Amino acid sequence: MSMTRPDAIPIGRSGEPALQIARRCAQEAGRIALDRFRQPHEITVKGRGDLLTEADLAVERFLHRAIAEEFPGHGMLSEETAADAATDGWVWIVDPIDGTRNFVAGIPFFCVNIALCHNGEPAVAVTYDPVHDDAFWAEREGGTWLNGQPVRASNVNTVAASVLGIDLGYHDERGRAILQLAHQLFPGVQSLRVPGSAALGLAYAACGRYDLFLHHYLYPWDIAAAILLVREAGGTITNHIGSTVGVTSRTVLAGAPAAHADFLQWQADNEANLSLPDEE
């Protein structure tokens, strides 16, 4: 008699696996967002640089409805309408449009982010960039895939040889700290990139487009999918000081294992000149 582990990845009511449902939902959500891209928007300002559009809400409503139809007993944690939900049990963590500031400005770099977690541990992850039709996905113990091809994190050994992605987030002090760090580091890195979408930047770290990605102010919907994408791609993902990362972690450092270790050493050697966030 076969035994099923208590946290076996569930099947939807349609009989489809969770990963297949997440991929289908992400693509449809991306289509909804893309239909509204570079169109007039009703914009609500949540904070400096932190915007909400009717497109965010339309995508989120679709995802809530589509996922609830397949998994009526699962929880939902999402940026716009369920940001305070619990993470116990099976929970879908969703960002309808990560990179809304880019989206509003007409900059073609944003994504739909979906993760299915069990007690805070990601089991399924999908990050979908509808502009470039790039679909990143992973399932626990199943590797990381980009558009149907397996991908791996970078094998770069040093920070000096790395393309480093950074983002500033919506915390002014931590954003300034990232810029200060970049100032101290440069030119001891190949190049710096500020994508404006943490979730997509982390997906780039998972597939090796970025060698490293650093952020000091994240939310669960930014990081949940990335934890699985990076790990399944053979990358290293921790918080900014190298400790274990989780869906509620505020900071992240992800990418090539050797370059990750080299960055932590550089950071420790230069700590006196940096304004690092408090340990989580």
Image (spheres, grey):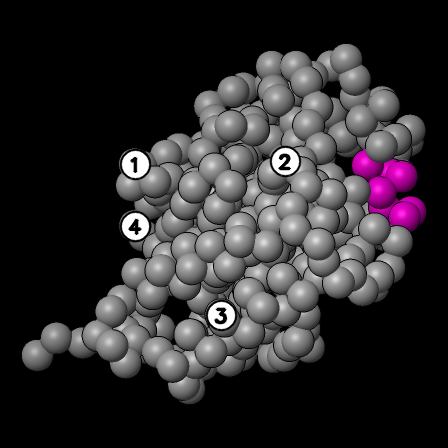
Q: Residue furthest front?
A: 40
Quote the CA–CA distance across marks 1 and 2.
22 Å
Q: Residue at x 59, y 54 (%)?
A: 36
Three-letter residue code for mark 3: Leu
> Residue visible at 87% across and 38% down?
177
From the viewer's perspective, is 235 left or right of 217?
A: left
Q: Which residues are magenta?
A: 172-178
Q: Does dot 2 land on a helix, a strand or a loop?
A: strand
Quadrant where the image shows the C terminus: bottom right
Between the C-alphas of marks 1 and 3, the distance is: 25 Å
Q: Mark 2 or mark 4, which has the lower sequence index?
A: 4
CB of mark 3 within 8 Å of CB of mark 2?
no
Picture disc at residue 213? 2
First in sequence: mark 1 or mark 3? 3
Q: Is residue 206 placed above or below 52 in the rendered structure?
A: above
Count residues near mark 1 (Cα–Cα under 10 Å), then give few for <14, some for 14-19, many for 20+: few
Residue appearing at x 27%, y 67% in the figure:
17
**For the view shown, which residue lies furthest in the left direction?**
1
Indicate which disc residue 149 carries: 1
Q: Amino acid at mark 1?
A: Gln
| Residue 198 location, quadrant | top right
What percent of the width, then of the height, locates residue 89? 47, 79
Q: Quadrant of the N terminus?
A: bottom left
State yes or no: discs 1 and 2 in contact (Cβ < 8 Å): no
Disc 3 to disc 2, how far (Cα)? Answer: 27 Å
Disc 1 or 4, which lies upstream in sequence? 4
Name the residue type under label 4: Gly
Q: Compare residues 180 and 47 and report the one nearer the observer.
A: 47
